[in-house]
């Protein structure tokens, strides 16, 4: 059995994170995990040319990939490191996890923050990504129509937020949506509080998407 955390952040990209990519890798190797998905924030004001004069799309993408690239380099094959995303759209407080993310996707679509859940969901289907609602029942979140997402993060391990995971689980089950679990790690001590358990090793994002579609065991 293999263990993967689907929701972690690096301080290189996410302003709210206190953990560098290199330290994150060390923590997850020590915790016995087989891999992590780097889901740094991709939100208005973060690696966003609209909010930083002189920042080009090329520069924004390179900056966004820094945490993932540093983690992959630090892992040196000892831990699988995959690229994901925690996406927020302009004018919304909700966050969404994107699985199956590729560097090519980032280069191809510079304006995804200007989309909305329904339009991005349509795009994600065309690009064979999975689009999950992250911690959908925290304060300030609004409930998203189930036909705009593929799944729900039903276990979010962040200790400094009340994610009301029991409501997320009930919503996912009622709506027949896919489910995920992640630590939402932002600081030392918040690692290894969630994840998925699978029978076969996940080596790339195609494997991850396939596993999530087939409903892995969740760390709860």
Image (tube, rainbow, N blue to C red):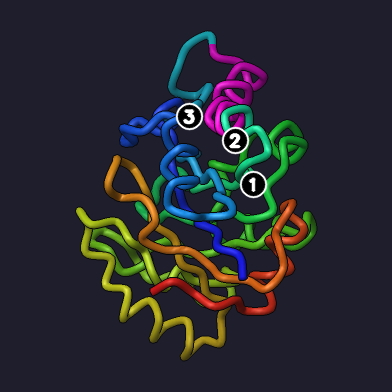
The crowding category of the residue bearing disc 1, from other C-alpha atoms within 10 Å (few below 14, some 14 to 19, many at least 20), is: many
Q: Residue 25 carries which label?
A: none
54 w.r.t. 215: above or below: above
Q: Is the magenta stretch mostly helix, strand or loop?
A: helix
Residue 17 sits in which quadrant? top left
Q: How far apart are marks 3 and 2 (CA)?
A: 8 Å
Residue toward you, 98 or 200: 200
Tell me: 220 left or right of 210: left
Q: Name the residue under label 2.
A: 75
Disc 3 on helix, strand or loop?
helix
Residue sitting at x 62%, y 22%: 62
Q: Do the residues labelled 2 and 1 touch (CB within 8 Å)?
A: yes
The crowding category of the residue bearing disc 2, from other C-alpha atoms within 10 Å (few below 14, some 14 to 19, many at least 20), is: many
117 w.r.t. 114: above or below: below
Dot placed on the residue nearer the N-terminal end, 2 or 1: 2
User: What is the span of residues highlighted in magenta in the rendered image?
Assistant: 55-71
Residue toward you, 128 or 36: 36
Residue sitting at x 30%, y 50%: 190
14 w.r.t. 139: above or below: above
Residue sitting at x 41%, y 42%: 27
Dot placed on the residue nearer the N-terminal end, 1 or 3: 3
Disc 1 on helix, strand or loop?
strand
Q: Mark 3 points at which residue?
A: 22
Q: Where does the image place residue 174, in percent across and percent down from the top left?
A: 47, 91
The crowding category of the residue bearing disc 3, from other C-alpha atoms within 10 Å (few below 14, some 14 to 19, many at least 20), is: some
Q: Where does the image place residue 83, in percent across and percent down from the top left?
A: 63, 43
Tell me: 100 left or right of 96: right
Q: Where does the image place residue 101, in percent across and percent down from the top left?
A: 68, 47
Q: Name the residue under label 1.
A: 80
Residue sitting at x 36%, y 63%: 156
């Amino acid at each position: 059995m293999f263990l993967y955390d689907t929701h972690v952040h690096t301080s290189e990209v996410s302003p709210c994170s206190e953990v560098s990519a290199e330290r994150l890798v060390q923590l997850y190797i020590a915790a016995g995990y087989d891999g992590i998905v780097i889901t740094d924030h991709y939100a208005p004001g973060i690696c966003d040319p609209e909010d930083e004069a002189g920042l080009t799309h090329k520069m924004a993408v390179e900056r966004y990939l820094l945490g993932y690239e540093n983690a992959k380099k630090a892992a040196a094959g000892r831990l699988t490191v995959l690229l994901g995303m925690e996406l927020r759209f302009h004018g919304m407080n909700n966050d969404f996890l994107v699985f199956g993310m590729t560097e090519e996707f980032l280069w191809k679509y510079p304006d995804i923050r200007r989309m909305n859940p329904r339009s991005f969901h349509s795009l994600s289907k065309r690009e064979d990504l999975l689009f999950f609602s992250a911690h959908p029942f925290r304060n300030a979140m609004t409930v998203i129509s189930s036909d705009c997402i593929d799944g729900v993060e039903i276990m979010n391990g962040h200790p400094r937020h009340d994610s009301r995971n029991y409501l997320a689980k009930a919503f996912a089950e009622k709506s027949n949506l896919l489910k995920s679990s992640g630590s939402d790690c932002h600081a030392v001590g918040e690692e290894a509080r969630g994840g998925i358990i699978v029978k076969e090793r996940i080596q790339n994002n195609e494997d991850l998407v396939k596993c999530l579609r087939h409903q892995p065991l969740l760390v709860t």
